[in-house]
């Protein structure tokens, strides 16, 4: 029998309270005490995965080594724990129903009427326990997406109720994250929304074991006692989560509040050893005490929503701390960039990153940004679509192929320097069909990237359909845009550089997905260093 313990994190009152950060912070504290921990996200939407969602809808789509397109919270989990996640760490209602319907079609239910209870709930419970039954983890934390009371969340809440009963109180607990709002007119914090949220949870048969209260002001002892009394939790289990200057403060704040200690006590686990947060706090110290500042322009088409580029922004925080500089990221909408305005918009920057994306909107602005960085010797970093824009810009403005383009933007272009991958040409379904997950890349000796990685063979995560067209490689290399990273199996060009430029690198993959607090991604570290050196010239 599995000895894995389970922690369920639910939310109430409002969305966007930070269940993912609380889950990741608790996991960090438990990991720092020596426990093997992983975190899982259950999303109540009916999409099979976030892969087909517009970034404005749901923020970025995070990709794991095994090719799962997942919720952005998995990025937080990896950045905090420095442990890779997988397909099993993100489950959606769409995937649950798809699996149950496929089983029904195969006759696995032996002619039974298929219902939410027990068939859907059994499927959810099975998915929750996959990670625990693997034997790889002592504790599995499962974050339930949405807010208690939402219709779409009910099957998950019922599954948690059943599983908590089956596992027993020593093996499972529920942390409920709520909001304690401050009413400025009354000049006080109000507990009623939290009381109602806990009541809604209890109506579903679940008692909260720990309350984590998001608040803008300190909770008084009287208010904590009131919450404990009316929400039926122990006083020590009322945890304050006050606004933080950075998400990386939250593990220390949760430690000060005793969240890990009360969790271990309720799960009947030893808390004799204090968490070792030495490396974490060294990072935090460097992050909060920079010796210099650099300004980097993030050129994208979804910049109105910061979560669209969440992993990139966090990778800059990690790389900034590693270089002991503060990275000021200026978001620039590529739709608003043109040859006339570009000098005014980009001249004050120390580096330019052209971000990933899909579709033709804002493409010409990205190409102009690449040109500006190339012509002005400004450090340039292109990721996925950003790398493809670098190839198009070079083809147009250096090779003289004025109509060079990607067939994603112009199917009839005479110079398809970026083209649909051969294996993609027969695919009609959009979900889960791109080149996804970890792929190998061999680096060219003497290149910028070979020095950055200090390795000949690397593995990075991908999410794309279009690729560098090798038919143009000889012309591009002769003109100075060199392919310095090649997939050894397919010959796909993964990385391009301009050796004569101070720092010009475009990568087809997504390095931001693998940057963590413990291991800042070397490409981001090198790019920030190059931007700093550019700033002091």
Image (cartoon, grey):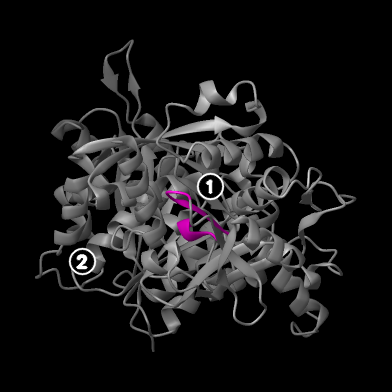
Quadrant where the N terminus is found in the figure:
bottom left
Based on the picture, tell me whether residue 12 belongs to the magenta stretch.
no
Whole-percent x and y of residue 275?
A: 15, 64
Q: Can you identify the residue that label 2 sits on?
A: 32
Q: Secondary structure at mark 1?
A: loop
Determine the CA span between mark 2 and mark 1.
Answer: 28 Å
Foreground pick, 61 / 109: 61
Q: Which residues are magenta?
A: 501-512
Q: Can you identify the residue that label 1 sits on?
A: 146
Q: Is residue 390 visible?
A: yes
- State left or right for residue 245 relative to residue 291: right
Quadrant where the C terminus is found in the figure:
top left
Whole-percent x and y of residue 318?
A: 32, 51
Residue plotted at (35% across, 27% down): 181
Q: Which mark is residue 378?
A: none
- State left or right for residue 453 relative to residue 427: left
Q: Secondary structure at mark 2?
A: helix
Q: Tag 2: Cα neighbours inside 10 Å, few (<14), some, or many (≥20)?
A: some
Point out the residue furthest to the right here: 412
Q: Pointer 2 and pointer 1: residues touching (CB < 8 Å)?
A: no
- Judge whether 514 appears above or below 146 on screen: below
Q: Tag 1: Cα neighbours inside 10 Å, few (<14), some, or many (≥20)?
A: many
- Residue 75: image quadrant is bottom left
Residue plotted at (30% across, 57% down): 517
- Judge whether 264 appears above or below 144 on screen: below
């Amino acid at each position: 029998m599995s000895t894995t313990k389970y922690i369920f994190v639910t939310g109430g009152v409002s969305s966007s309270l930070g269940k993912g950060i609380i889950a990741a912070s608790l996991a960090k504290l438990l990991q720092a005490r020596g426990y093997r921990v992983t975190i899982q996200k259950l999303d109540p939407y009916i999409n099979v995965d976030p892969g087909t969602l517009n970034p404005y809808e749901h923020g970025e789509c995070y990709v794991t080594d095994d090719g799962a397109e997942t919720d952005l919270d998995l990025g937080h989990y990896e950045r905090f724990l420095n442990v890779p996640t997988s397909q099993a760490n993100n489950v959606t209602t769409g995937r649950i129903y798809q699996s149950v319907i496929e089983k029904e079609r195969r006759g696995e239910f032996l002619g039974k009427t298929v219902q939410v209870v027990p068939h859907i709930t059994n499927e959810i419970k099975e998915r929750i326990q996959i990670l625990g039954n693997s034997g790889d983890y002592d504790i599995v934390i499962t974050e339930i997406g949405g807010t208690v009371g939402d219709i779409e969340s009910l099957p998950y809440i019922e599954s948690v109720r059943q599983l908590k009963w089956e596992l027993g109180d020593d093996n499972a607990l529920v942390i409920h994250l709520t909001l304690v709002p401050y009413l400025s007119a009354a000049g006080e914090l109000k507990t009623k929304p939290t009381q109602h949220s806990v009541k809604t949870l209890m109506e579903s048969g679940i008692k909260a074991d720990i309350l984590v209260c998001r608040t803008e002001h300190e909770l008084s002892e009287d208010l904590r006692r009131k919450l404990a009394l009316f929400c039926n939790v122990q006083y020590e289990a009322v945890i304050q989560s006050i606004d933080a200057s950075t998400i990386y403060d939250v593990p220390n704040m949760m430690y000060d509040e005793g969240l890990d200690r009360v969790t271990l006590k309720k799960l009947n686990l030893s808390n004799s050893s204090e968490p070792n947060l030495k490396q974490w706090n060294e990072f935090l110290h460097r992050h909060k005490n920079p010796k210099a500042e650099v300004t980097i322009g993030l050129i994208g088409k979804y910049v109105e929503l910061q979560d669209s580029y969440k992993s990139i922004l966090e990778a800059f925080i990690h790389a900034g701390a590693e270089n002991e500089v503060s990275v000021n990221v200026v978001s620039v909408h590529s739709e608003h960039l043109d040859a006339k305005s570009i000098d005014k918009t980009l001249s004050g920057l120390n580096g330019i990153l052209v971000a990933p994306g899909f579709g033709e909107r804002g493409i010409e602005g990205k190409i102009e940004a690449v040109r500006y960085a190339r012509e002005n010797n400004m450090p340039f970093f292109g990721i996925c679509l950003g790398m493809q824009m670098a190839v198009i810009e070079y083809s147009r403005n250096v090779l003289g192929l004025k109509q060079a383009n990607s067939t994603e933007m112009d199917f009839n272009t005479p110079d398809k320097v970026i083209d649909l991958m051969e294996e993609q040409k027969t695919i009609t379904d959009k979900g889960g069909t791109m080149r996804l997950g970890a792929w190998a890349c061999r680096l060219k000796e003497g290149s910028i990237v070979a020095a950055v990685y200090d390795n000949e063979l690397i593995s990075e995560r991908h999410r794309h359909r279009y690729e560098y067209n090798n038919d143009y490689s000889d012309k591009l290399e002769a003109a100075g845009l060199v392919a310095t990273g090649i997939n050894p199996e397919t010959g796909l060009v993964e990385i391009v550089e301009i050796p004569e430029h101070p720092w010009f690198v475009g990568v087809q993959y997504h390095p931001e997905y693998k940057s963590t607090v413990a291991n800042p991604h070397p490409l981001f570290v090198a790019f920030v260093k190059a931007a700093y050196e550019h700033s002091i010239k």
